[in-house]
Image (spheres, rainbow, N blue to C red):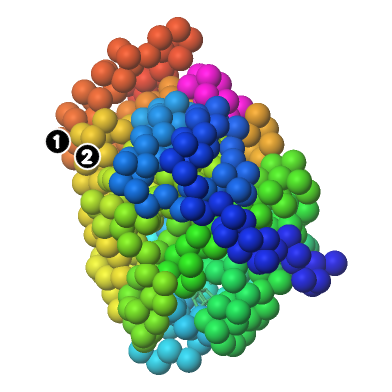
Amino acid sequence: MYNVPANFINEQKIWDTLKNHQKAENAQVREVLSKAREMKGLNLADVAVLTGISDPEMLGELFNTANEVKETIYGKRLVLFAPLYISNMCSNECVYCAFRATNKDIVRNALSQEHIAREVEVLINQGHKRILMVAGESYPNQGFQYILDSIRTIYSVKTQHGETRRVNVNIAPLSTEEFKLLKSEGIGTYQIFQETYHRETYKTVHLGGKKRDYNWRVWSLHRAMEAGIDDVGIGVLFGLFDYRFEILAMMQHIFELEDKFGVGPHTISVPRLEPATGSDLASHPPFPVSDIDFRKIVAILRLAVPYTGIIMSTRETAKMRRETFALGVSQISAGSRTNPGGYEEETEDDPSGQFSLGDHRPLDEVIRDVASMGYVPSFCTACYRLGRTGRDFMDLAKPGDIKLHCAPNALSSFKEYLQNYAQPETVKTGNELIQKTIAEMDGIARQRAEKLVKRVEAGRDDVYC
Ligand code: SAM
Ligand code: SF4
């Protein structure tokens, strides 16, 4: 059913909308910004207006509005996760990726289940609770069962204080039947990036393997949702094509999912092309995205889909990551390795990694930095474990309700991190932040936060509401 052209990505409509709305007067831009403050999302024309902003004064207004919306909905929370690359074997030929099939410059490795367990142990002992499992599109002899076994292995590892409480997955598109099996292993979010929605460009950067099929990929989230996976994540690899086109196309994808399934994506990822071993294109992006445009992309997405999480990976530098927290980012990775086995080996920017990293700091250093900026690092996984996923999550995701759940849970999970894993300096910064944050809360949220944090102080782990 899903091998027909995906007409919901309507390129002509994107170009027409950009042409008609890109050169808006300041008054029009302000109208869109005031609509965005209502936090009900934006339509295609609104988004086109925002992509056309270049005047520094209007950019400043865009950034301020994004910051307002971010603070109202998400407060100061930032959710932490770690990617876990289990295999860099791949049968595709994506010209920007070090894992592409014909690249002879990297060492290939698909981790055994024992090796995966050791990697997970390292991550748990650092304090991580959320793992994003990542793999190339070619599995060892067990085939797809390798993926299912690996998820089971990740959940099975327990150490003194910890375990993985949510496994998200970023792997190649699956059939509906395979998605059902993935769901039965208890995954959180299934993520897949279209890379580029522009069909012509898609063809020129995907030269071989199953990934050449644009339609198979773009329909994959329909199949995932049909299989019962409520939380899906989308993304674009920025740098391959015009970012204005890509944002509008991503909006068309989001509207389509909302229309068909009553709920859009749980997260959006905004990877920017980074240098990768054996790829000239990765070092010379055909459509480079400047730092200012990158911040603009984050701000526009925050306003366009206010309740969808925005993920910022360690592809970006510490500085850029800091700047985008204020604009709308709600989840970040930390201490990442993109080569299979990289956590146990402690390799930094291994040439066999998928791409170069911009932020090499270990988790504890990132946490200390984030906390000293006033953001509360959160390891919370409550929604997923209480079944608040998909539409239920979006229903809960009203500013008031989020404050009643997410803010207390962020503080208790952060307290758990401080007690079990943090360095003394981080403990000090973190405890001060927890006290200050609770002092600024009121009503039920404050009562809940105080109660949960006290339970952690008394030695209980994994408390949430
Ligand atoms: N192999 C699967 C796929 O391609 O969908 C899933 C995992 S792939 C390892 C994860 C993502 O890494 C890709 O979707 C792509 O957007 C991103 N990526 C690949 N090469 C990159 C590069 N040079 N710089 C930044 N991100 C890159
Ligand atoms: Fe393989 Fe994914 Fe890299 Fe493409 S992006 S070569 S599919 S790992």
Label 2 neighbour load within 10 Å: few <14, some 14-19, many 20+ = many
Is residue 174 visible in this depiction of the protein?
Answer: yes
Q: Nearer the viewer, mark 2 or mark 1?
A: 2
Instruction: Assign a secondary structure to mark 1.
Output: helix
| Amino acid at dot 2 | Arg
Q: Looking at the rendering, which quadrant does residue 383 occupy?
A: top right
Residue 32, compared with residue 204, is above or below; it is above
Instruction: Assign a secondary structure to mark 2.
Output: helix
Q: Which mark is residue 463?
A: none
Q: Position of residue 300 (x, y in %)?
A: 47, 46
- Say if mark 2 contacts mark 1, CB within 8 Å: yes
Which residue is located at x 40 percent, y 30 percent?
Answer: 68
- Residue 401 part of the magenta segment: yes
Question: Along the line of sight, which residue is nearer the eye, 236 or 443?
Answer: 236
- What residue span does the magenta drawing correspond to? 396-404
Q: Position of residue 267 (x, y in %)?
A: 54, 48
Residue 387, compared with residue 244, is above or below; it is above
Residue 181, compared with residue 129, is above or below; it is below
Dominant secondary structure of the residues highlighted in magenta in the image: helix
Q: Which mark is residue 368?
A: 2
Q: Position of residue 275 (x, y in %)?
A: 33, 75
Q: Looking at the rendering, which quadrant does residue 38 occupy?
A: top right
- Residue at the disc numbered 1: 425
| Amino acid at dot 1 | Glu
- Residue 232 part of the magenta segment: no
